[in-house]
Amino acid sequence: MKQRLIAAGLLGVVLGAAPAHAVFLDAEHSIQFTGKVYTQASLRTEDSASGGISCYPFGAACEGFTFPDTRTGQLIQHRNLLDVELFHDVGKWLGPQFTLLDQLDYRLRVKYFYDGVYDYGPHQYRNPTSALDATSVPPLSRILYDGLRNARHHDTQHDPLWNAYIDAGRGRFKVRIGRQDLSWGESDGFRLLDMIEPLDNRFGFPLVEDLDDRRIPLWMVRPSISLGRVGPVSNLTLDGYWVPGTIDNQIAPVANFGNPFAVPNPPGPSDLMRPSKNLGNSRGGGRLIGTVGGATLSIAHYVTFNDVPAISLKVNSVDYIPIGAPGSIPNFVYFSPNGLFLVDFYQQQITGGSATFPLPFDPYTIMRMETAFFWDEKVFIPNQSVNLAVPRCGVQAGPCPSPGIGAQPSKDVLRWLIAADRNVWIRWLNPENTFYFSGQYFHTNIFNYQQGIANAVPSHTQLVTVGQSPIPGTGISVPVNANTFSWVPRRADEITLTYLVNTLVWHGTIQPQVFGLYDFRGVHSIVPSISYQYGTNLVFTMKYAYTTGTFANLGFFRDRDQLLFRVQYNLS
Amino acid sequence: MHAQRKWTTPMAVVAGLLALLSAPTWADVVPGETIDKSNWQKADGLLPDPVLSYVKKGDFVLKIGKLDFDPVWEPEFQQASQANAGKYDIDADGGILDPKTGKRPEYVYGFPFPTIDPADPKAASKIAWNRWYTIFKGGQNYFPYGVEWVGRGGFERQIAGQSSEFFFDGRPGKVDNPEGTELREYSNVTSPASVEGFIQLTWRYMDNRPDSVWSYVPAMRRTRQLSSVNRSDPFLGSDFTSDDTFVWFGKNQSMTWKLVGQQDILVQSTLPKPVPFDAGPQSAYGTSWILNKEYKGATFGYETPGWTGAPWAMTNVIWVKRPVWVLEAFPKDPYYSYGRQVVYADRENGLFHYKVVYNRAGEYWKLAFVDMSPGWSPDGKHRYAVTAVQMAIDDKSDHAGIGTGTGTKGNISEYNSYRLKPQMFLVDTLLKWGK
């Protein structure tokens, strides 16, 4: 309640003080204050598929692992965000007598948000205990409970100092030092050359959130040198970055089990292996960018931490647990490798390039192309990543002498994209403005593909009999049952198409938009939205996200359709 | 009934004759008088049709004035212009041609076509080029600006930003131009917060290539190449298009130009004297000329107490008579949003004052115009094409876009600015300044 009061008070202060123009704090217009504040609520528009949670682990064949179970109309997000920036162009401020540098400035950005869903949302989020199924076995209940508690405490961005950097430049050289954002490449939504910064997967439903809100800036040194014209290449620039691993080891946070936007998974313990802070865990890379004729070209190589971690099973002991009434002959023996899944964020080498140019025969159309080769990307192959863990335990039953850990196989993966953007007049529909059309073809190819490569997301589990176990002194045997998972397979070639159409009407105050995505695995998403700008500073937005199709890739979220409302106030 | 009809016709004839007799042979105005909806006839023939209709409706009230100075360019420019006489021609695409080389001259200072022969079929193209060299002579300019959306109900919203231009041709003193660019423009948005940080860089080439445009989009944290040819699309949903800047900011070769007449016309000016510019810091390009902060530019109906006209009308200006060429421009690009455009170009200083825009179906659509408020250094040796306002009025939707320029809303412009160097207009500039 106290947090809410503070947030409401803060909102009142900033709204009351907000002007309708740029806020410069000096006559020279060198110190600028800017920012925004918004409140955003999302409602689920379909019931969760949560059947698997209630029957796991002993159900016959369970599927549907969205937790907590959420019903149509329930609130799943109420984010209140304050985002303020101070930019000081020190060179401009010092005036023309300052000649030491061509550019000297700094920017501070503070971002704070509070999501009320865990305080005043539906009972499942407000009170973890109430989310638990009465039939859940105690260890499972504990995991579920902890998942929700963790979601409450960890689904937030704790560091409010979002950007803090200094720019200094002289002549051809420039460097930016501090916590900053950096994005390379030409793709919208797909991460090829743009996996420099980690994305916050806890931060709402990806299809409806602003990408910029999901980026987590890094502490980095980012030098660039302008090489000018070299042969046929104009605007040639070499830029690079280095994130010292001793300072910043941020990885893409995994949405906690219990987060409304987490990938559905059966409950189970996991160990998130964050890279340690040492120089070996540094990120860095370089890019050469220039223009040739009408085309803007770039080539780049960089090392980063892959947003998608490597998953493998770690077994500490192999247990056989009799299941049945105490003192009686068990119904069956439950074969349970006792362990957890290792969630390992690893360094990833990526090499690629991009090109953008207007079509020679239709300069209204801008083509975008990007390709990136992911060297030795870790892949999940259940036979190796999971099934090898038990034999590596070294014992048939009991504690492992040393933990049995599944393998982390890797493959080279090529990702590429071709896109076209064009503004088109459809005057009978909108005589005021053009329609912006954008289409993307995105392709992922796994080199040396082998059967069994999968996503570390089970589609369902089932209890299967893997043997018989004699009951000492009885002369009878009972089945040995084990849970097996059906993992969602990956294909050698995955293809996704996206489309985006928007326009402006009523003097630019209303923007209707449709974004859609079709995954050749049979997943279709569509996100219609509309925003209305009232005056300079107030923006109302409504978005609906609908996903249907197979349980693969974005289809993991096919039971998460939602309606989003946002009211944003620009502070300058 | 019949009796009434019998008398009606002769009375109408008499009334018509009286009206003819009482009307002046041609409309005219004199400094000091006010033209409004009660006496709009006095300005008939001295205004583009849309402006006259604004006066008839009461949207505009014209305070007729007189300039205390001759709004022509400094002697250095005039002399250079005369020296250019007969040197250049127009090529088949509408570009400037040096007949000696068969190519566009690398550098021209002054009017390339100081003498216009109305009978010359290329006269309109030459006038259009002359206008560009009045802009180019600024060298490198820095403009804080705003764009306001104004409807019948008054002010609606705005964005603010800063624009910088570096001209490689037509500037006082030649500079290296390895990329063959005519001009480069860098523009960024400073408010509101939702679009703050947006940067756009434009390169316009000396030859007939289309412009190159890159932008830095803060929401994506990326530099993007954009299509340069959709210059007639509304700017962020406003009534402005990129080509409406300074009435016309497009590539001359993209239009077919035709001279259709000459006349006198009333244009707006914020002062009867030149807008004062003070000497600023020196740079490799000479003295910077910075707007004197006492100059406040234009005010508008929506902020003027007691004003009953259009909210977008300028309320602190005088209307002065100028001799103009009347041109027609027809887009070569079939996708261009506009159809025929009628442009009024000053016969003495080359500036464009008005553009009357028709849609592709030939219907009148909107009017783009600027005020003529030339900026002078104290000694008058440095004179610049200064506008307090650039405006586009969409008469189909009864709505206006106002570009607030020099002096207006505290915008302090700088000509031949010390801040600007050619290397600031490279793609890596977007990387440097993108947040």
Image (cartoon, grey):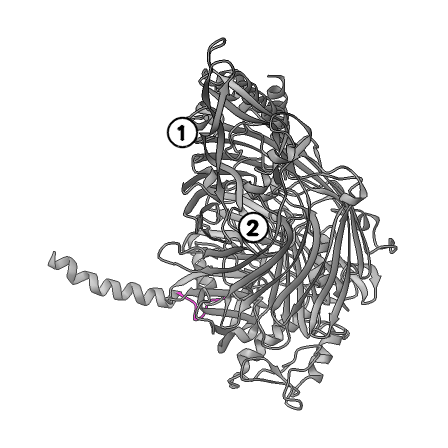
Measured in 3D between alpha carbons, the distance from the residue under mark 2 to the one under mark 1, in whole angstroms, is 28 Å
Q: Count neighbours of disc 2 (C-alpha within 10 A) and say few if under 14, some if 14 to 19, many if 20 or more.
A: some
Q: Earlier in the sequence, mark 2 or mark 1?
A: 1
Along the line of sight, the residue nearer the viewer: A515 or B425:
A515
Q: Taking A368 as reference, is B130 above or below it?
A: below
Q: Which residues are magenta?
A: B23-29
- The kind of residue on which mark 1 rests is Asp
Residue B388 appears anywhere in the view: yes
Pointer 1 chain:
A
- The x, y position of residue A52, in whole percent, is 44, 28
Q: Is residue B26 magenta?
A: yes
The reply to the same-chain question for discs 2 and 1 is: yes
Residue sticking out furthest to the left:
B2
- The x, y position of residue B126, in whole percent, is 58, 79
**Residue at image mark 1:** A47
- The x, y position of residue A129, in whole percent, is 52, 16
Q: Taking A26 as reference, is B324 above or below it?
A: below
